[in-house]
Amino acid sequence: MKTDTQRGMTLMLFAMALFAVEDTFIKLLSANMPYTQIVAVLGAMGCATFLGLARAKGVRIGRSGLFRPIVLFRSVCEAFGSICFVIALALTELSSTTAIFQALPLAILLGAALFLGEPVGWRRWITIIIGFLGVMMVIRPGYEGFQPVSLLALVSVLLLAARDLVTRRMPADVRSEILAAGAFGATLVAALVLAVSLGQVFLWPGLTQWMFLLGCWASGVVAYAALVAATRQSEASALAPLRYARLVFALIFGVLIFHERPDHMTLIGAAIIVGSGCYAMWREAKLRRRHQETMGPASSL
């Protein structure tokens, strides 16, 4: 019989695989559909899903805190972060975009130190620097083959890090379903505005596109549910390294479906990002355990 930790780790791997599947569907859709339309449709589907969940749980939307300034700011960060990620995914390789995206935990750590005043020792500062050097190895500005649009993946990382940092200051009475619905709703609005600004014309999806859209929506929802279940069953320190399994799945899908061939620089940069992120999370977990041991049993009262 599996332990709770083993079940949690299995669910985390399952969630990461599904997130990679979701990214793959987005890239497949981008071959025949404007990226603003992809974002708009997924935003509408996600907003409807989480509003439905909120209503099913008896949440009154008018009194949910959806339009509080802090919630709106979080939604804007999510919306433009998602749009930047989808554009990068559509116009660059799946493997390289996913590799850059793995710098998100390091960006959150950096933001927590700069804006929330959280203590970060010299070891983790060095880790952050090394991790972003890995990002630069993947992007390679100034070198042959540099794709400026790949910088949007980095912008996405910074915006989504801001989203997560704001979430730490979110009032406790704002439900997670409302946060998700607001983020998807803002993404829908931002995508429509961007489509008008760029003159992109939406197309009626064919059967294949509808299947990809439904597959994208289903994989995203199930992945989110598996992620929540995993975090409830296992310690964060055991699950944290498994978040990088998303990159492994993305590399596999990139090679098998899109015939990508990541070069050595990309693979080395990705390995540096993953290694830095794993060390930062391990160090944070170690410091947390040390703090708990210092506080003693009375701290849990």
Image (spheres, rainbow, N blue to C red):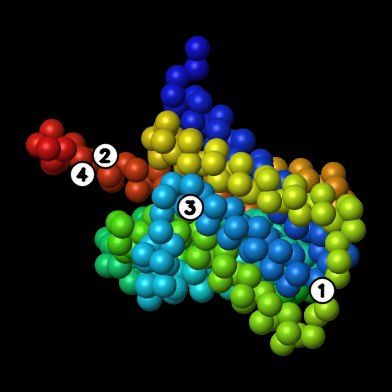
Local SS, label 3: helix
According to the picture, the residue beneath numbered tag 3 turns out to be 55
Q: Is residue 215 above or below residue 165?
A: above
Q: Is residue 89 above or below residue 267?
A: below
Q: Amino acid at mark 3?
A: Arg
> To which quarter of the image does residue 16 belong?
top right
- Is 209 displayed left or right of 68 in the figure? right
Q: Earlier in the sequence, mark 1 or mark 3?
A: 3
The answer to the question of whether label 2 and label 4 lie on touching residues, with beta carbons closer than 8 A, is yes
Q: Nearer the viewer, residue 147 or 141?
A: 147
Q: Amino acid at mark 2?
A: Arg
Report how far apart the C-alphas of labels 4 and 3 lie in the structure. Answer: 40 Å
Q: Residue at x 90, y 58 (%)?
A: 206
Report how far apart the C-alphas of labels 4 and 1 lie in the structure. Answer: 54 Å
Q: Position of residue 237 (x, y in %)?
A: 40, 39
Q: Amino acid at mark 1?
A: Phe
Q: Residue at x 82, y 49 (%)?
A: 211
According to the picture, the residue beneath numbered tag 1 turns out to be 202
Q: Earlier in the sequence, mark 2 or mark 3?
A: 3
Q: Earlier in the sequence, mark 4 or mark 3?
A: 3
Q: Earlier in the sequence, mark 4 or mark 1?
A: 1
According to the picture, the residue beneath numbered tag 2 turns out to be 289
According to the picture, the residue beneath numbered tag 4 turns out to be 291
Q: Residue at x 55, y 33 (%)?
A: 11
> Can see residue 105?
no
Report how far apart the C-alphas of labels 2 and 4 lie in the structure. Answer: 5 Å
